[in-house]
Amino acid sequence: MNIIFKSIVGSQAYGTNTAGSDTDFKGVYVQPTRELVGFGYKEQIEVSKDECYYEVRRFLQLLKSANPTMLELLFMPEDCIIEKHPAFDLILKHRDKFLTKKCLHSFGGYAVAQIKKARGLDKKMNWEKERMVRKSLMEFCYVYQNGKTKALATFLEENDIDEKDCGLVGLSHFRDCYALYHDPSQSLGYRGILSKNGDNIKLSSVPKGEKDLTVLHFNKDGYSTHCKDYLQYTDWLKNRNTQRYVDIETHGQQIDGKNLLHCKRLLDMALEIAEHKTIIVRRPNAQDLLKIRRGEINLEQFMQQAEEDIQKLNAYFEKSDLPDDVEEEFVNELLLEVREAIN
């Protein structure tokens, strides 16, 4: 892999890193011509979740589409750059040409996405306590009695019935509904209601003529959803960003400040592109951005203001003399020039 550019990116480059922040790397490489004309083309290589490289053709395609992450690589602070080949300078000297009116939708669109993520009504860190507790299958079973439904556990307790003395028989045309039989003598061989590990119900053979006690409904879909949610939650607990969780627990606003930090950063960058035709990666207001992350401001009010600012961006870009797009021929010639410089 012929790496022509490698840089530290993310919070370390923005100046918004905290004690627990990871160090992320992104870069650009040039594949040999032999691999390009064969079946070996790879537009992207992920070394790890923290390190990723883009083949120069893919990199230029993303630049042309005004991808914010790729555009930032053209304006990285010198102290973040780890490796830079002269071939990459061929791209850098034309970096201004990649700042177009498309940035309104790419940077603005990313900002909108961050607001939606920040609201995070279904973020796992905001899940109600009861949703985080592993429930038994019994809690998803109900019986029909006297025109009303009742929790199976309550029914069994009120009638002094052991679930092991019960038998279930499926009912045709009644999805997830069963006839419930009881044999306190245990002479009929009923298998009980719950499987040995308690993750499914059991059916029994019931002799003809036996009278059922009631109809049982097993909320199978609800149980399945609960199991899936619980598994996702426990996985999240193992892998969560502890500092991010602590921040939200501390300010108690149930809004993810880190998403809003990025929202503000993206809006500021979009404005700088429209007014000054540049991207400032190392944010001069890094401390203010960290206050947003820590929830030291009213995050709900911030989101309302951010949504208004997104609308104002349209006016800034309309006034700007930025080009609408990058010329296809220019990008193609630049790609060939970079390849020739390597091969």
Image (cartoon, grey):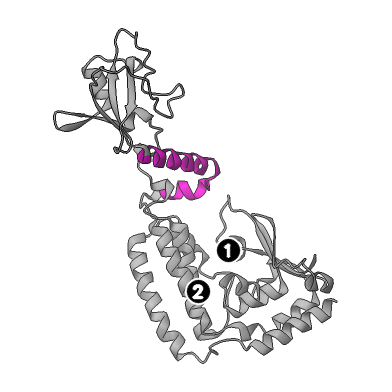
**Pointer 2 or 1: first along the chain:** 1
Q: Secondary structure at mark 1?
A: loop
How many marks the image carries: the answer is 2
In this picture, which residue range is highlighted in magenta?
Answer: 221-248
Residue 129 inside the magenta-drawn segment: no
In the displayed structure, 129 sits above or below 165; it is below
Instruction: Tell me residue 188's x, y (percent).
Output: 34, 11
**What is the quadrant of the C terminus in the image?**
bottom right
Q: Disc 2 vs disc 1: which is toward the camera?
A: 2
Q: Which picture quadrant has residue 172? A: top left
- Secondary structure of the residue carrying numbered label 2: helix
Provide residue 181's location: percent of width, then percent of height: 28, 20
Q: Residues within 10 Å of mark 2 (few under 14, many from 20)?
A: many
Q: Is residue 63 left or right of residue 190?
A: right
Q: Amino acid at mark 1?
A: Gly
Residue at mark 2: 107
Residue identified by numbered label 1: 15
Q: Is residue 243 above or below residue 212?
A: below
In the image: residue 253, left or right of residue 39: left
The reply to whether residue 158 is visible in this rendering is yes
The secondary structure that most of the magenta stretch takes on is helix
Q: Amino acid at mark 2?
A: Phe
Q: Residue at x 45, y 41 (%)?
A: 228
- Tell me: residue 144, above or below residue 333: above
Query: Looking at the figure, which quarter contains the N terminus?
Result: bottom right
Residue 323 % position (x, y)? 55, 90
Q: Kindly indicate the quadrant of the structure image that contains residue 327.
A: bottom right
Instruction: Give the Cα distance between marks 2 and 1.
Output: 19 Å
Please indicate whether residue 184 sits to the left or right of residue 324 in the image. left
Q: Out of 148 and 69, give the one closest to the viewer.
A: 148
